[in-house]
Image: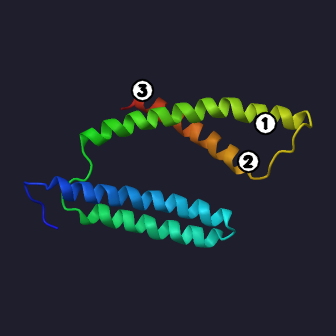
Amino acid sequence: MPQNDTIDPATETTYRRLHAALWLCSGVALGGLIVAGYPLLGVGAFAACAVGAFSVYRRYGDPLFDERDQRIQEAASERTITIFGLGSAVVFPTVTALWALDVIAWPLWLTPIAFFVAALSLLHGASLAYERRWA
């Protein structure tokens, strides 16, 4: 689609909604198919929806996201990291203490999540250090 000076708001809205819907479907399909016992189908559905979302983004000839979206993204990212950080600071030590006291068994599925949250926290800390030092 060639770039033009007039952007039809209805077209932009349609592309934005389709882009968001495909990403939403990718996550729902992945989670739903994993729960249903079909993890490889879940991965395939996720990949198909992700390719669709990228295609929609690339097909739209004008900027689909702009500085308004950047401000919204920054606020949402900040809130997400805060919630994950505070939640992790409560959940993982509590589960660890309960496990150590033999009150609960450490669920196997919690281990990769714990490592992911730790990696996310380390990445966030490194990003903060980078922004303060070099950006």
Q: Secondary structure at mark 1?
A: helix
Picture coordinates of residue 123 (x, y %)? Answer: 54, 39
Asked whether, in this view, residue 33 is left or right of residue 2, the answer is right
Task: Identify whether 135 is placed above or below 30.
Answer: above
Q: Earlier in the sequence, mark 2 or mark 1?
A: 1
Q: Residue furthest front?
A: 10
- What's the distance in space between the residues labelled 2 and 1, CA to CA? 10 Å
Give the label, 3 or 1, closer to the camera.
1
Residue found 71% across the figure and 34% down from its top: 91
Q: Which residue is mark 2?
A: 110
Q: Earlier in the sequence, mark 3 or mark 2?
A: 2
Q: Contact (CB < 8 A) between labels 2 and 1? A: yes
Residue found 13% across the figure and 65% down from its top: 2
Tell me which corner region of the image, top left, top right, bottom left or bottom right, holds residue 115.
Answer: top right
Amino acid tagged 1: Val
Q: Which residue is mark 1?
A: 95
Residue found 41% across the figure and 62% down from its top: 22
Q: Residues within 10 Å of mark 3 (few under 14, many from 20)?
A: few
Amino acid tagged 2: Leu
Q: Which residue is mark 3?
A: 132
Q: Earlier in the sequence, mark 3 or mark 1?
A: 1
